[in-house]
Image: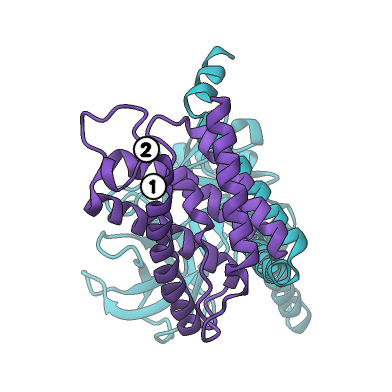
Chain colours: A purple, B cyan
Amino acid sequence: MLLTSLQRLFWMVVLLAVQMLVFNHIHLFGYVTPLPFVFFLLPFPLGTERWNILLWGFVCGLLVDITTLTPGIGAASMTLTAFVQPLLLTLMVPKDATEDLRPGYTTLGSRAYFYYTALLTLLFTFTYFAILAFSFHDLIDLVISFASSWSLTFLLCLIFEGFYTKKHD
Amino acid sequence: MRALLDFITKYHHWLLLVVLEGFSLALLFQFNHYHNSVWMTTANRVVGAVNAWEQQAMRYITMGEVNEDLMLRNIILEQNNEAMARRLTELTHDSTWTERRQARLLADVNMLPARVINNNVLLRDNFITIDRGTADGVEPEMGVVCGTGIVGIIFLVSKHYAIVQPVLNSRSRISCRLRNSQFFGYLKWEGGSPLFATLDDIPRHARFKVGDTVETSGFSSVFPPGIFVGKVAEIENSDDGLSFKLRIHLGTDFSRLQNVCVVQQRFHSELHDLEQQADSIAQL
């Protein structure tokens, strides 16, 4: 339990550092801002308690907010994504899956993991950009920013999962 | 308490979600000027809209009370108008004993506001129930009026309620007259539209026209004179051809009746008893 928590903390620090030092400085064409720190929520195993993942999501989002000076935006969107993650994972896993099943290419299968990552990153990016804009005044700009940022975030999460799986295998 | 604990245990992740999201949104509105201003603008707009709805609702709720006051005021003004018209007539020509008596009767009238709690206009013999009874001084044979004209006569009374026999009842006969010519007849209802009644027994030599006002004659202890009844809509010959039969467009819309007033005349009982004695002696 302690080891798992330390591992999660380690991954969170790594993701936050990467986000803060690299991805926060990327604004391709003034629209595309990747937010791959959401990857932190993706590998949580099937049997993780709901309150546990909610708190981890909230803390991670809050730390991102502190580094990007946007209090509340990351925390709110990460908390909502953390709430939906167990529900989505339950729909994706095989019926005979054990509680310690960690979602990945090998455990879920490439196709299911692809959908799982796509939907969670979609929910997170949409929530993040909706709260950030907080208005539908520039709807076209908002849709372009959201769609392009989601595409890049989704791609980065798939790549991160490759590294994560190699490290744990 | 146990059920509450069970509820919290079962749905703790929902509660945690609400708390964390609430905290996140509090941070959002507290530390981001743009979000704060958008939130305040929207919140102000919503609060303004809610306040406007509340005011409209309150105005609607108090409308009944305002309506009752206006109706009472209307009746009082109508009575004042009648009294002043009489006074003017007295000053401009020699007053008769009857006119002076009617003016005296009008001064003794008390209007008791009442609310209609049951009403019907679809039957041949309709009745109306009002929320006043003997406890309020209501007695049988008292008149009932509303802001737009006469309603009927008290038929039965209990302690807190009374049944009114309205104009829309085949047994109702109310003495009325034409305002301009003072010819009088009896107002009856022969069924059909609740907006029209018939005034019988207007003599052949009477001169009047369609649109003339019909009012109570005051020749009984029920209604004081001069209360608006309706307007002449059509003129026909009576069945025997000896008098006119007028179709009257009633001032009172019985299908929307809500607030009425019971006409309490100070000497109502005395006058009513005297008239009944006279009737019984005449029948002997």
Q: Which disc number belongs to residue A102? A: 2
Residue A164 image offset from top left, x and y in percent: 43, 48
Residue B6 image offset from top left, x and y in percent: 51, 18
* Relative depth, front residue between A101 and B32: A101
Q: Quadrant of residue B137?
A: top right
Rendered position, B181 above or below A125: below
Q: Which residue is tagged 1?
A: A166
Q: Tell me, yes or no, whether the two marked residues, 1 and 2, touch with CB atoms within 8 Å.
A: no
Q: Indicate the amino acid at tag 1.
A: Lys
Q: Mark 2 lies on which chain?
A: A
Q: Residue at x 48, y 63 (%)?
A: A125
Rendered position, B144 above or below A125: above
* Relative depth, front residue between B29 and B122: B29
Q: Residues within 10 Å of mark 1 (few under 14, many from 20)?
A: few
Rendered position, A155 above or below B159: below
Q: Does residue B101 appear in this view?
A: no
